[in-house]
Structures are given as structure tokens and as C-alpha cells.
Image (cartoon, rainbow, N blue to C red):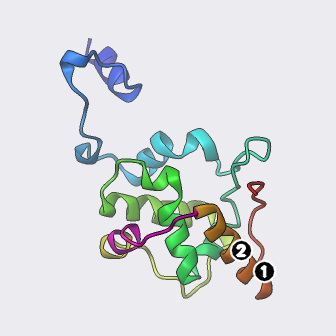
């Protein structure tokens, strides 16, 4: 029965009377939070989906960590922002993503994300995250740094 309850929690299938779990208090690892909140779009391997308009993380995402506005962008990506994680958990997931998928795209001097930085960047107003990504990608391109394709207008 415990296995059924755990499966129901992970799939969001608990009856209303059981209440909703507080995902910020689960104690899941950064990898588990990536699997639960990010892999549905970016895949377990970080490949993304060209057809679905989801950029690849592999050998690309690290470029954003080396740019001030790029760091804001990755914190403000709707899937990150709406993942119902604390700033500390968000930082842990972003650091997991950088370590696991960034490869050579991560500048050697890029600092890991931390709770205070994530909280600060979450509070910054960004009216158009697509435009922000476009601006950051253009600036990176001018510096000879390429990032994964992004089909959104």
C-alpha cells in the first residue's frame, strides 16, 4: 500500500481529502527535482525537443551561467520559476544542471548558484522571458559563444 501512496504522490494523484503535498519540504535531491520538474520537457539526458521548441541543455546551458542577464534568464524560465521550489532548492537544481549538462559551455569562472542569488533574481521584473533569452543569446553570439537553438519568436 505504501508503494501505491508514493506513486500517487509522485503522479499528483492523491484524493483531495488527502491534501496536496508541500513539494518544498520533500527533501528530494537536486537530481530528483530535475527529473520531477524539468525532464518532462528537457529529457533525462538534457537533449530538449527541437520539434517541441524546448532548447537542449547539453553543451549549451553553461553559457548562460557566465552572463549576468543569462543567470537571470535561467532563474526566470517559466518551468524553473513555477516549479514550486525554494530558492535553495532551485539553486541546487540549477547547479545540478550545470554540472550534468553544461560541459564545455560552462565558463571556468562561473560561480555556482546560491539561495540568495536565486531569491534576488526571482524578484527582478522580467516582462518577456523570450525577449530576454534572445538578447542574451545575441550578446553571447557577439562574443563567439553559441547556445542551443530556440524557435520562439
Q: Residue at the location (42% across, 49% down)?
A: 82
Q: Nearer the viewer, residue 95 or 37?
A: 37
Q: Nearer the viewer, residue 107 or 149?
A: 149
At label 2, counting other C-alpha atoms closer than 10 Å, the crowd grade (few under 14, some 14-19, many 20 or more) is many
Identify the element where label 2 is drawn.
helix
Identify the element where label 1 is drawn.
helix
How far from the left and from the top, in percent, is residue 109? 55, 88
Q: Residue at the location (69% across, 60% down)?
A: 58
- Between the residue at mark 1 and the residue at mark 2, the CA separation in whole angstroms equals 6 Å
Decide if residue 24 is on the left or right side of residue 98: left
Magenta-colored segment: predominant secondary structure: loop
The quadrant where residue 10 appears: top left
Residues under numbered marks 1 and 2 in contact, where contact means CB atoms less than 8 Å apart: yes
Decide if residue 128 is on the left or right side of residue 137: left
Magenta segment boundaries in residue numbering: 119-128
Q: Quadrant of the C terminus?
A: bottom right
The residue to which callout 2 is attached is: 137
Q: Residue at the location (33% across, 46% down)?
A: 28
How far from the left and from the top, in percent, is residue 43? 63, 43
Decide if residue 143 is on the left or right side of residue 76: right
Q: Nearer the viewer, residue 142 or 97?
A: 142
Residue 105, compared with residue 21, is above or below; it is: below
Amino acid at each position: 500500500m505504501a508503494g501505491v501512496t508514493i506513486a500517487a504522490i509522485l503522479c499528483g494523484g492523491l484524493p483531495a481529502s488527502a491534501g496536496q503535498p508541500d513539494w518544498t519540504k520533500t527533501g528530494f535531491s537536486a537530481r530528483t527535482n530535475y527529473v520531477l520538474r524539468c525532464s518532462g520537457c528537457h529529457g533525462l539526458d538534457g537533449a530538449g525537443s527541437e520539434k517541441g521548441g524546448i532548447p537542449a541543455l547539453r553543451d549549451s546551458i553553461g553559457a548562460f551561467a557566465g552572463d549576468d542577464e543569462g543567470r537571470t534568464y535561467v532563474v526566470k524560465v517559466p518551468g524553473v520559476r513555477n516549479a514550486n521550489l525554494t530558492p535553495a532548492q532551485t539553486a541546487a537544481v540549477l547547479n545540478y544542471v550545470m554540472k550534468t549538462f553544461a560541459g564545455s559551455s560552462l565558463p571556468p569562472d562561473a560561480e555556482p548558484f546560491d539561495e540568495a542569488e536565486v531569491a534576488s533574481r526571482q524578484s527582478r521584473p522580467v516582462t518577456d522571458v523570450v525577449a530576454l533569452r534572445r538578447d542574451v543569446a545575441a550578446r553571447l553570439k557577439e562574443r563567439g559563444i553559441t547556445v542551443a537553438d530556440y524557435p520562439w519568436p
